Image: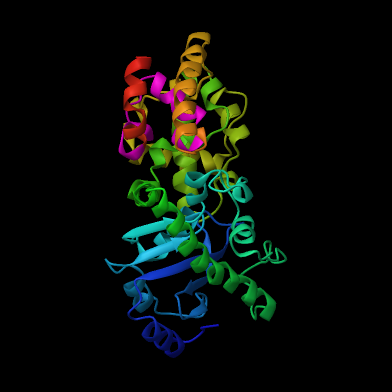
Amino acid sequence: MIQTQAQLHDFLHRIKDETELAIDTEFKWTNTYYPKLCLLQIASKTAADCIDILAIKNLTPLFDKLYQKNMLWIAHAARNDIEVLYRYSKQLPSQVFDTQIAPDLLKNLRPEEANFGAQMSYQALTEILQGITLEKAYTRLDWTTRPLPAEAIEYALDDVRYLIKNYHQLKTKLESEQKLGWLMEEGQSLLDIHLYEVDVFRSWRRVKGFSRLPKQTHNIATQLASWREHHAINKNKPRKWILSDNDLINIALGKNGLSDKKQQEFENFLSQYPQLQDMICDVRQHTPPTAEEKAQKVILQKAIQGKANQYNLTMEIIANSKTLLRYIRGDQSVNFLSGWRFNLLKEELKKCKIV
């Protein structure tokens, strides 16, 4: 495990010419707003090692390598790794190959791989592709523990050792079906900076039960949610530690109140952000579908299922239930109105005439 600047320098020198790197992270996310990065695993075709982020003071040389313009990140469920590293680097990779998304594009490629499906775990994918069963003994380990057990380090390294092998096999399969471009397009969608920057004024969307509140309480609930998010960020504490969803709802309904200290903090926050006084929340996208909307969704699902069958895809990878409802309600930003999905569906969407 790399724990000194000199060791990091040597490792970066070994991979200096590599433009494809398998990436995985181990972090702790139990009592903070942001995840605490503890370990970064990197593998190339010829090298693999764990970098102890808690021990390395200067991460700039590492980030210089990871965020090179010609660098391809290979990761499983890449958004998690992109997010936790963005917190430390304030940078996004140039391109990403997500091995969790790839199986969704390869459904039923061969009979023995028929269980490729949505949100496949790294362990399941590795067992299918490599015939290797990986241990899960350290999935709940506190990665801030030092020294780390040798077995835990090997466990972490396995996450990138086989990731490289999985990548090459998946890439070959995608190329044979002319779907590699689709996968890379999916990777690009993960590189939207808005996915990783918090908008406190939209944090009401995180409040469970918000859409069921009476309209006259939306403004106070929005203010409370924004204050809670702002406060949680500043203190780097989970938002529920500041105020639970249930308490927030009850305060908005007038059933409960904030403590004197929190009330003062809340009022100070509102004085800094007067725009919250007139903020309008569109909760329509969060309400249950009407009978007419359900009927429209069935029409769309039938058309999309036909295309999914034609290209050996799950319907959900093209458009899931929530995305369809957003489209029916007029949202033109849904993912199947652009890119490879739209190329598959544009004629069917014209025939359906939903929007």
Indicate left or right for 228 with 140 as reference. Answer: left
Q: Position of residue 286 (x, y in %)?
A: 49, 25
The number of numbered badges drawn on the structure is: 0
Residue at 39% over, 76% down: 59
- In magenta, the rendered stretch is 316-340
Task: Quarter of the image for the N terminus: give it.
Answer: bottom right
Indicate left or right for 6 with 69 as reference. Answer: right
As for residue 133 lying within the magenta part, the answer is no
Residue 128 quadrant = bottom right
Q: Residue furthest right?
A: 137
Give the overall secondary structure of the magenta segment.
helix
Indicate left or right for 9 with 225 as reference. Answer: left
Q: Is residue 230 above or below residue 350?
A: below
Q: Position of residue 299 (x, y in %)?
A: 47, 16
Of residues 15 and 149, the one nearer the viewer is: 15
Q: Is residue 230 above or below residue 40?
A: above
By what rule are the colours in the image chosen? Answer: rainbow
Residue at 41% over, 42% down: 200
Residue at 35% over, 27% down: 279
Q: Is residue 285 above or below residue 102?
A: above
Question: Is residue 169 at all visible to an observer of this figure?
Answer: yes
Q: Position of residue 22 (x, y in %)?
A: 46, 68
Residue at 54% over, 46% down: 239
Indicate left or right for 23 with 15 as reference. Answer: right
Question: Is residue 149 at all visible to an observer of this figure?
Answer: no
As for residue 335 lying within the magenta part, the answer is yes
Task: Quarter of the image for the C terminus: give it.
Answer: top left
Of residues 139 and 232, the one nearer the viewer is: 139
